[in-house]
Image: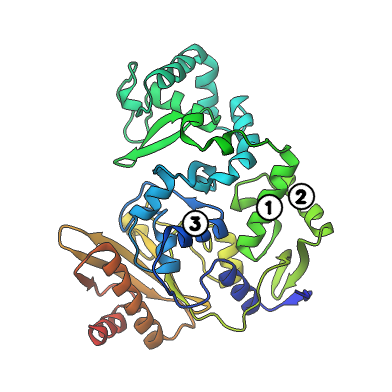
Amino acid sequence: MRARVDFSRAEARRIAISAQGLDAPRRGALTRASLLRIVDRLGVLQIDAVNVLARAHYVPLFSRRGPYDTKCLDRAAYGRDQALFEYWGHQASLLPVSLHPLFRFRMERAASLQQIYGGLAKFVRERRSYVESVYAEVAERGPLRAGELASSTPRQGGWWGWSDGKRALEWLFWAGRVTTKARKNFERVYDLTERVLPAEVTSAKTPSVEDAQRELVKLSARALGIATDDDLADYFRLRLGEVRPRIAELVDARVLVPVRIEGIAKPAYLHADAKVPRAASGRAILSPFDPLVWHRARTHRLFDFHYRIEIYTPEHLRNHGYYVLPFLDGEVLAARVDLKASREASTLLVQAVHLEPGADSKKTAESLAAELGDVASWLGLERISVTRKGSLAAALKRALVTCS
C-alpha cells in the first residue's frame, strides 16, 4: 500500500480494529483451521484465572467468530495434534508453536535468573539442588501437577502462596525446561518440553536475540496495525530499549512506516500491509485481556476510553462494576458492561451497563442486546437478567424485550 503520513484518530481506530479482525460482522462456524488463523493473526491469547464469565483465553475467539465449542481451542492447545503452547507471551499466554524459538531468549534469561520475579530468583539460587530434583521427578514420573510431586507441601498464604514444588516448576516452566501438557481444573500439568511440543519445533534453530525480537515486533505491528513504540513493546512484553532499534530496522526494511495520528503527540508506525477501511461494522464484547484493549494507554489514546479492571478494587470504590467488559460497536467502544454467568440459574447477569459519552443510547442498546444474546447462547444460558444499575440499563432492558 502507498502509506500516508497523517491519519485522523477515526482512521487509526479503524486500522486497529481491522488488524484485530473485528471490523466486520461475524460469519461462519469456527473450525480448527479458522481458529488457528485467528491465533496466528493475533499472535497470542492471554490466559487468566478469573472465570466470572468465561476463561480469558476463550473470549477473544468468541469476539471474532461468535458462539463456538471451546473444546476446539483446548484440543489445539493440549491435544494430540498440538498447535499452541503456553508461555509468557503477553503475561501467561497461549502462542502458536511456531513462535517457540522466538521466546528462547526469554527462557535463557530466566534460566540465568534474569527477568523473573525477584523472589523466584532468590528461591532458585538458594534451593538449586531441590529444583533439579523436581525436574528429575517430572522426567521420571511426568506429566505431574505441583500437588503430585513427592515433595509436595501445602500452599502458603492462600491462592497465590505457592508451595516449594510449585515455585520450582514455575521456574522450570519460565526457563523452558518444562511446559504445560494439560490443565485439570485450570491447574497446570507439567511435563518435559521435548515430550510435549512437536519435534520439528524443539529442533528448530534458535535465532539471535535481535532476530527474535525483530520478528516479535513485526508480529506485534501486524496485529496492532498502527502503534507507538510502547504499544509494540507491550504486546509481547519486550523491553522498550530493546524494541526501539528493532523498530528502526523494520522502518529501513519498509515493514513499518512512520506516521502521525491526529491529536496524539507520540510518533506512530503503520504496518506496511495494514488496511485502512472506510468503515467498521462489527460488534463484540471484549475480554479485559483482549489484545485490542489490554494496553490501557493505547485504548485511551485511540478510543478516548479510560479503562481499568476493578476486580481488586473495594466494591464501594468501583465505578462500573466487578468484571467489566468493553463493548465495541462499529468503530467505537460504546459501552461497558459488568457481566456474570450464573450457571446454577442458567442466567447471564448484567450487573451494570454504562453508555459511553457520545454513543447513541438506542442504537447501542439494540446492538448490545443482540451481542448478549450470542453470549448467552455460547455459554448455554437460558436467560438474560439486567439490573437497574448504569446509564444504559433501561434502554438495554427495552431492547432485550424487542429481541426476544
Mark closest to the chain's N terminus, 3 or 1: 3
Which residue shows up at 75% across the image and 42% down it? 210
Where disc 3 sits, the SS reads helix
Where disc 2 sits, the SS reads helix
Q: Where, by quadrant of the figure, is residue 125 drawn?
A: top right
Give coordinates of residue 209: x percent, y percent: 72, 38
Structural distance between the alpha carbons of marks 3 and 1: 20 Å
Which residue shows up at 75% across the image and 71% down it? 260
Find the residue positioned furthest to the top: 129
Mark closest to the chain's N terminus, 2 or 3: 3
Give coordinates of residue 198: x percent, y percent: 51, 38
Q: Is residue 189 left or right of residue 382?
A: right
Give coordinates of residue 187: x percent, y percent: 34, 37
Give coordinates of residue 380: x percent, y percent: 23, 64
Whether label 2 touches label 1, CB < 8 Å? yes
Residue marked by disc 2? 246
| Label 2 Cα crowd, 10 Å radius (few <14 / some 14-19 / many 20+) | many
Residue marked by disc 3? 36
Which residue shows up at 37% across the image and 38% down it? 182
| Label 1 Cα crowd, 10 Å radius (few <14 / some 14-19 / many 20+) | many
Q: Nearer the viewer, residue 325 or 404?
A: 404
State the quadrant of the N terminus. bottom right
Instruction: Tell me the number on the disc at residue 217.
Output: 1
Q: Is residue 133 above or below residue 176?
A: above
Whether label 3 touches label 1, CB < 8 Å? no
